[in-house]
Image: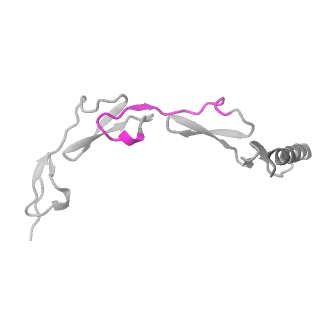
Amino acid sequence: DFTCECKDGFVPKDPSKKGQKDAACIAKHKCRDTDCKGDNTKCVEAGSDFTCECKDGFVPKDVGKKGQKDAVCIAKHKCQDTDCKGDNTKCVEAGSDFTCECKEQKKYNARINMNVMDLNVKKGKIKSVFQKAMITIVTASKTLNW
């Protein structure tokens, strides 16, 4: 028994027929500088064709065009200390944008839009923080008719 293989520089026209006697081979694509039209992209060989991927440090501007020849890539967001304004928050990179999330040991109460510290005694301020949180909750509860 035997299998048929493509010569160097060629790939199976139909990958499902690889090794079969009736498999046809076509020239493997060699990337050229002009293959990808979008900004900050690079050509990646994919058999007899190619895809355009983002260069390191870049993300697709339109996820729906990822890998396409006209894909455009934009700089990936690098979190800065000033990105998130809320107390006890941290910046989390999300492609070309970012989100602000609560740091460890913190919980976020979305109903009243405030950070509430877990009940660990730190620097003797827990009573004050707890009282302020309770006042805010009661006020929000009355205002929103919870």
Quadrant of residue 101 in the image?
top right
Quick one: which residue is furthest to the front in this view? 145
Q: Is residue 7 visible?
A: no
Q: Is residue 16 magenta?
A: no
Q: Is residue 80 magenta?
A: yes
Going by the image, does 15 lie left or right of 39? left
Quick one: which residue is furthest to the bottom in this view? 1
Q: Position of residue 67 (x, y in %)?
A: 33, 41
Going by the image, does 134 lie left or right of 14? right
Does the magenta stretch mainly form a helix, a strand or a loop?
A: loop
Q: Please determine whether, in this image, residue 122 is positioned above or below residue 15.
A: above
Q: Please determine whether, in this image, residue 80 is positioned above or below residue 50.
A: above
Q: Residue at x 28, y 36 (%)?
A: 69
Q: Position of residue 88 (x, y in %)?
A: 73, 40
Image quarter (top left, top right, bottom left or bottom right) of the N terminus: bottom left
Q: How many marks?
A: 0
Q: Please determine whether, in this image, residue 79 is positioned above or below residue 141.
A: above
Quadrant of residue 73 in the image?
top left
Q: Position of residue 124 (x, y in %)?
A: 91, 44
Q: Position of residue 87 (x, y in %)?
A: 75, 37
Towards the viewer: 91 or 64 = 64
Q: Residue at x 11, y 52 (%)?
A: 25
Going by the image, does 42 lie left or right of 3? right
Start and end of the magenta stretch?
Answer: 63-84
Q: Is residue 76 visible?
A: yes
Q: Residue at x 22, y 32 (%)?
A: 32
